[in-house]
Image (cartoon, grey):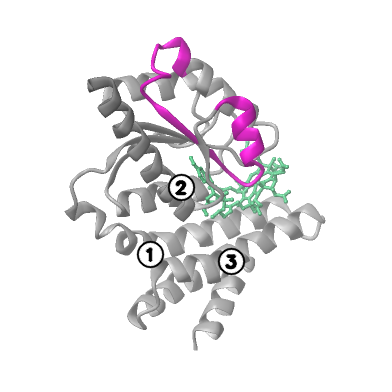
Amino acid sequence: MSDDTFSAMRKSILDGASDTASELAKHALAAGIAPLDAINNGYVPGMQEVGEQFAHGQMFLPDMMASAEAMRAALTVLEPELKKHGEERPSAGTVVLGTTKGDIHEIGKTLVGTLLSAHGFRVHDLGVDVPGEKFASKARELKADIVGVSALLTTTMKNQKGVIEELAKAGLRSHVKIIVGGAPVSRRWADEIGADGYAKDAMSAVALARELMERKSQGAVKELS
Ligand code: B1M
């Protein structure tokens, strides 16, 4: 039954059918399908196929926008379910999150934020097309533990480095851990620009954020002793 549902979800994204995507998400929850399974096995494969078709000239920008809308419609139904448990816990840390300057892709970044919230992190989402200075000023204001920077374009990846430079300029680099991610980003790129970590997907971002918080608190203990 799930396989049929997942393939209908995939198709709703390819068709850019927001109503169907949203209805399927509601049915999935009612049928006891875990929201993250619906996202990872149904909707995300649809998005990946959209990307492939776009790259091969089989789909055009308006279609890709309709697919993004359908994805958003599904996530609007699923995200509150994902978030539910995080609100009941003590804060695991404060994260300032955004998509880098020049880049308006928000779906993956928002999913990362949702899962971090679901796992107890306080997440401040700055949105898309965010300049480095804004990451730095919000991180200072909120005394953020982690700054997360998403980039989906090969042309905007370099702006992740710009965010790290802005944090250094603001004197925050030693207090704030930096996570980078997004489809064209790799561990190698993260190392090259001096980020503290790279996560390939939203669940890995949660694991990484936890690990970095652990390292942060060990550092604090060392400083005290
Ligand atoms: Co655009 N787009 N797009 N697009 N788009 C891509 C990225 C592309 C690969 C498509 C393609 O050609 N195959 C291509 C980039 C090529 C490149 O740079 N190498 C591309 C292009 C070219 C463009 C435009 C330039 C098109 C044009 O105008 N001619 C334009 C750029 C606009 C801009 O930003 N300035 C553009 C526009 C758009 C839309 C507006 C239509 C729409 C975005 C709508 C929106 O977000 N509101 C869109 C979409 C939907 C895509 C694809 C199809 C899907 C992206 C997505 O939402 N995936 C994408 C193709 C693809 O990625 N396969 C494509 C689903 C999402 C769950 O996955 O975002 O990868 P993802 O996030 C994952 C991980 O990457 C990771 O976790 C997430 C969840 O598991 N992750 C992180 C993400 N951020 C993270 C941060 C972290 C950690 C992990 O820590 C902080």
Residue in view at x 35 percent, y 24 percent = 139
Q: Residues within 10 Å of mark 3 (few under 14, many from 20)?
A: many
Q: Which region shows up in magenta? A: 167-194
Residue for badge 2: 205
Can see residue 124?
no
Residue 104, above or below 70 = above
Residue type highlighted by circle 2 = Ala
Residue 222 numbered mark, or none: none
Residue in view at x 39 percent, y 72 percent = 34
- Mark 1 or mark 3, which has the lower sequence index? 3
- Mark 1 or mark 2, which has the lower sequence index? 1
Res. 95 image quadrant: top left
Left or right: where 48 falls relative to 211? right
Residue for badge 3: 13
- Mark 2 or mark 3, which has the lower sequence index? 3
Residue 205, above or below 35 = above
Residue for badge 1: 78
**Gap in Å between the C-alphas at discs 2 and 3?**
24 Å
User: Which x, y percent locates residue 64?
Assistant: 65, 55
Can see residue 202?
yes
Q: Name the outermost residue toward the right.
A: 56
Looking at the rendered structure, the secondary structure element under dot 3 is: helix
Residue at mark 1: C-beta within 8 A of ligand 1: no
User: Which x, y percent locates residue 75?
Assistant: 43, 60
Total labels: the figure holds 3
Quarter occupied by the C terminus = top left
**Gap in Å between the C-alphas at discs 1 and 2?**
19 Å
Residue type highlighted by circle 3 = Ile
Q: Name the outermost residue toward the front.
A: 225
